[in-house]
Structures are given as C-alpha cells and as structure tokens.
Amino acid sequence: MIGKALRKQLHRSMQSLVFGRTLLRKEGAEFAKSGEVSEYLSRWNTGLLLDGKDLRLSEQVSFQNVAVYGITGKGKSTAIARPAILDKANSDAVMIVNDMSGDLYRDTSGYMKARGYRVVVLNPNDLTQSNRFNPFLSLQDPAAIMRMAELFSKTGGDGDDKFWASGAERYIRFFLKCLGTMPDVFNTPHNLYHLLSNFGTDGEDLDEWVASCAKDDVFLQNEWKALTTGADETITSFLTNALVGLKIFSEPHVCALTSSSDFDLSSLRREKTIIYIVTPPEDQAIYRPVISMYFLSLVHACMKQLPGPQDLPVYLIYDEFGNSYLPGFDTLITTTRKYRMSFLLLMQGQQQLITKYGKDLMHVIMSGIATQISFGAAEHVTASFFEQKAGKVRMFYRNEERETHIEHQSEYNLINASQIRELPDDKLLIISDNRKTTLIDVYPSHRSARWLRMMKLPPAPITSKAEDRLVFIPL
C-alpha cells in the first residue's frame, strides 16, 4: 500500500513539474478489469461462445442477441461461427446456420451428427446433398402471407422504389392466397412465378383459374377485380417488379429444392437439429430471395407460440447478414428473448444495415442487440458507433501555476475510431448491455486442437426421399 501511494504521489509530482498541473481524479468510462469481465463472460455460462475458446455469455444475455462486425478475412467464421456451433454439440438446442460456401457444414456437421443432432442441409447448388423445403406449405395465416409477399417484393431492401414494390406486393400476396387453396403439389414458389408470367396485360388468361380458387371467397373475388383494373402500363410495371423479385424460381434446380418438404417443422423445437443453408459467396445476390425466404420461415416456425419446458433454445448463426433483407426484422430482433431465441449476426459493418433497412430501422435493430463485437479494420460507421458507445474519460486537475484553488476538467474518448480500426487480429472489442467496454483475445478454430479434432469427422451424409417432380398449374 505504501509503495502504491508513493508511486501515485511521484506521478502527480512529475505531472506538476512537466505540465504545470496536478491530476486529482478520473471519472467516466473505463475498460473492464479481468474480474468484471468474468462477471458476464465465463467458462461456466451456457450461452454463446465468443472468444473461440471458453468465454461464453449466459443464455439470457445470448437471447438478447449478438452482432459481430469484421471485414472479409478477419475471422468471423473461423473464430466465431465454427466454435459457436461446435460448442453446442453437447447441448440440446436448435441451430439455424447461413453457411457461406458450405464450409461450416463441411467442418461441423459430422461431429454434430455424432453428438445426436438431426442434420438438415438446404443447398440449391447440389441437390444430391440437400434436403427439400417448401415454406409455402406453412403459410397458414394472413400475416405469414403478407410477410412472404413483402420479402419477394423488396429483395433489394430499402433502396427499392416503394411505390412499385408495394404494387408488386399486392399481386404476389393475392396469388399466394390463391395457391393456399390448392393441393400441396401446386402450392409452390415455381407456380407463383408461373402465374405471374402468364398474367398477360389484363389477367384474362387466369380468370377461370382464379374463379375456381375464389368461388367461396368474396374478398378474393373483389381483390381480383381491383388487380385487373387500371392502366396497362402500371399493371405491367407492377408485374415486372414482382417477376424480378421471383426470377430465381425460373431455375429448375431451385424449383426442385423448394417444391416439397422432407422434414417436419412442427417438431423443430423438440429435437436437437442443425440446419445449414448453403449458398456460394459469389452468388449471394442471386440466391438472396431463397435465403431470406428460408430464414424467415424457420424463424417464424420457432415463434408460433411461447416455448414450453420441453422446447429447445434456438440459435441462429447468420453469416453475411448485411447482404440480406428480412421483413419485420426490427420487430423480430426485439422480441427473441421471450421465445428463447438468439441471433448471432455476422456482417462486415453497420453501413450494410443502413443500406438495407434505412437509418431509422437500423437504430431499432441495434436496440434489440445487447452485445456488440468488433474486429479490427472496422468501417467508418461501425468504428464511430463503438467510439461513441465506449464513452469518455473525464479528468479533473488543478493548475499549479495560477488559480490553484480552481478545479479544471477535460475529457477524451476511451477508445478512438482510429484505434478500433487498428485493433490487432487477435483482439475483440465488446460492448455488452450495461457492462464496461471489454477487450479480449480471440482464438481461431484452426489453431485449437480441440476444434481440429472435432472437424476431422467427415460431413454428415444427406439423403432426401423427396421426388423432384415439378407440377405446374394448368391454365
């Protein structure tokens, strides 16, 4: 204690000699000390693993969601996603993974299968190693139909022209309602595209089919009249926008993937399950409607009702989230806790969210994410966000040359945006809920004997019993 007090006094004396002022105290922001870090990041917690080694959040904080920012090549997959998946192998959970290029499936599915997980893969580029899933079969209520229609009409996100997108949404929503009246073999994404493609200029070619779907539904009958009345140029523009959003369903391999389902969503939260949605990185824009459709459907399948004691927690690991658009995500992200669901969102930066959702919705989405994590080399918007959230340090001092009785104050950022961009590759900056700003080491999976041992197992084999028979509605 004497030594500490002496060092403090010497420090003040040196400040007085060199700067002509004496520091009295510091207040405000500070980095978390090791003991404070262990209060919320611990090997004994059972939530999401964050450092690639043994530091986990609690389940409750995990259910308040996590966002990880890092440019390509910084280690979001190797240091965060792979360890987070494998760490759940001995737990009872449901995991839904957006898997860029199939690397996560390749490296983790074998061990997850060995630990009792049901493994489901949805891969449009390799149907021989893919299950089948048609989300249209689970569109049971008007809200679900509206969400799906909005998704297809706004696959480009916030930048789309709202007038034309809204018009396209009306046509998509109408045909989804009609498809819901038909046998499952016809209620498919490729038939939605088929109907829109055959609308013509006035819908006359579809009159007979619509009449058969709407014979007992006055609302559908009136809606059809409204959709077929108006300027030909306007109707054509609405239909063109709808077809652009659905153009991926003109591809036979995507139609085969989405024309039937070979796994049951109703039991999703009762059985240990991991679902990999696999798409090549270079084709993300092409497959965006499929990825978003699958995630939206799976998330809402897990949120049909509040979980009971037998329902498993759900972890959604969404790599390259910044490239996607999910309707109503601002509401989803702020309500996951009561459903025992956790989003782990991996993206390059917050600018992507602004581009897709706009500033207002981006701020709402941010309010639903309790734990924010940044690698180094953060883009400007992200670095500025962390600089502001980390807060400022306030210094109180006395001028030794004049006005010695007056207490002065100055302040500075706990960490500057430039320092955040310059973080070493093995460091993570974390701001979690009401905890102090935290710096921790991060450990890539390829440097861990534990993870490497698990990743040696070959990928889980996938076989689908579905018959890839595309049936089109006769018109």
Image: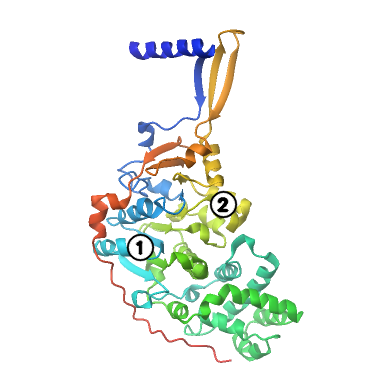
The residue carrying mark 2 is: 351
Q: Is residue 238 visible?
A: yes
Name the element at disc 2.
helix
* Camera-nearest residue between 6 and 87: 6
In the image, residue 102 sits, relative to residue 46, either above or below, namely below
Q: What residue appears at the point 45 percent right and 36 percent down from the top-left corner? A: 437
**Could you tell me residue 346's position as x and y percent?**
45, 54
Q: What residue appears at the point 48 percent right and 40 percent down from the top-left corner? A: 420
Q: What residue appears at the point 37 percent right and 47 percent down from the top-left corner? A: 50
Name the element at disc 1.
helix
In the image, residue 448 sits, relative to residue 127, either above or below, namely above
* Camera-nearest residue between 435 and 97: 97
Q: Is residue 65 visible?
A: no
**Could you tell me residue 1's position as x and y percent?**
34, 13
Query: What amino acid type should be assigned to the residue bearing mark 2?
Result: Gln
The residue carrying mark 1 is: 103
Q: Who comes first in sequence, dot 2 or dot 1?
A: 1
**Could you tell me residue 190's position as x and y percent?**
52, 81
Query: What amino acid type should be assigned to the residue bearing mark 1?
Result: Asp
